[in-house]
Image (cartoon, rainbow, N blue to C red):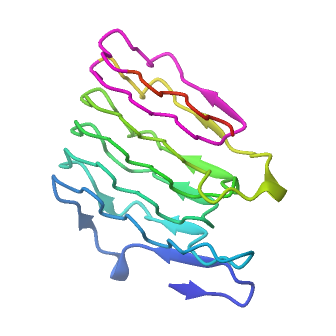
């Protein structure tokens, strides 16, 4: 971790420029990185997470809770460019309470973020950009766009998928297909609040 005089904190991967190969079961791989306990108006936590295109996720099948509570409550940017999710079947709680305080300004899933094989997206964005909401900054600027690669045709459960998601706008995209979904309970509960 590099802490600059300005207070900007960055967590950069990987060390020595070598590729890191993620395991097929990568549950909670980055959970709680940069997490801090809220203490009044004094916040800690990573503001930027950089993967630098050197994390190979092509063999991953399980990304459940992969970014759970990561960067909460201070993260402002998350760039997943290069993340190959074409073999992933489970994205449950993947971004649960990731970032926070409505401060997220940039969230990029990248061109390789493919969800065609995913069957569960329960709680996927639950609390994203919302945790420990700072009411003095209650107008989020992040616009979440799920493009055509966000194919949900095989998803059977979306329970609380966007619950308490705090974004300026949400664009589901052409690939957002709910024809096989059996459970959508609480899907948009508290969104934007």
- Write the residue at 36% across / 81% down: 15
Return the residue found at the far right: 136
Corner quadrant of residue 85: top left
The question of residue 85 being in magenta is answered with no
Expressed as whole percent of the image width and height from the top left, the position of residue 139 reads: 80, 46
Q: Which quadrant: the C terminus?
A: top right
Corner quadrant of residue 13: bottom left
> What is the magenta range?
154-183
Relative to 48, residue 17 above or below? below
The majority secondary structure of the magenta stretch comes to loop
The question of residue 167 being in magenta is answered with yes
- Write the residue at 15% across / 52% down: 24
- Write the residue at 61% across / 35% down: 190
Relative to 166, residue 22 above or below? below
Relative to 32, residue 139 above or below? above
68 relative to 181 in the view: left or right: right
Front-most of residues 136 and 121 = 136
Return the residue found at the far bottom: 5
Expressed as whole percent of the image width and height from the top left, the position of residue 38 reads: 61, 72
114 relative to 10 in the view: left or right: left
Expressed as whole percent of the image width and height from the top left, the position of residue 181 reads: 32, 16
Expressed as whole percent of the image width and height from the top left, the position of residue 130 reads: 62, 51
Front-most of residues 33 and 138 = 138
- Write the residue at 39% across / 39% down: 113
């Amino acid at each position: 971790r590099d802490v600059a005089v300005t207070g900007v904190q960055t967590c950069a991967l990987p060390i020595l420029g070598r590729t890191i190969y993620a395991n097929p079961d990568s549950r909670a791989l980055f959970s709680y990185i940069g997490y801090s306990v809220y203490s009044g108006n004094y916040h800690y936590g990573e503001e930027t997470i950089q993967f630098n295109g050197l994390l190979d996720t092509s063999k991953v099948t399980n990304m459940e809770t992969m970014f759970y509570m990561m960067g909460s409550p201070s993260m402002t940017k998350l760039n997943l460019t290069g993340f190959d999710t074409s073999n992933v079947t489970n994205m449950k709680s993947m971004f649960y309470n990731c970032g926070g305080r409505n401060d997220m300004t940039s969230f990029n899933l990248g061109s390789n973020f493919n969800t065609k094989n995913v069957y569960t997206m329960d709680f996927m964005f639950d609390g994203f950009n919302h945790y420990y909401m700072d009411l003095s900054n209650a107008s989020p600027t992040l616009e979440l766009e799920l493009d055509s690669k966000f194919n949900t045709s095989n998803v059977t459960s979306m329970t609380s998928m966007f619950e308490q998601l705090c974004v300026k706008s949400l664009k589901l995209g052409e690939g957002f297909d709910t024809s096989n979904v059996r459970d959508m309970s609480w899907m948009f509960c508290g969104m934007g609040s």
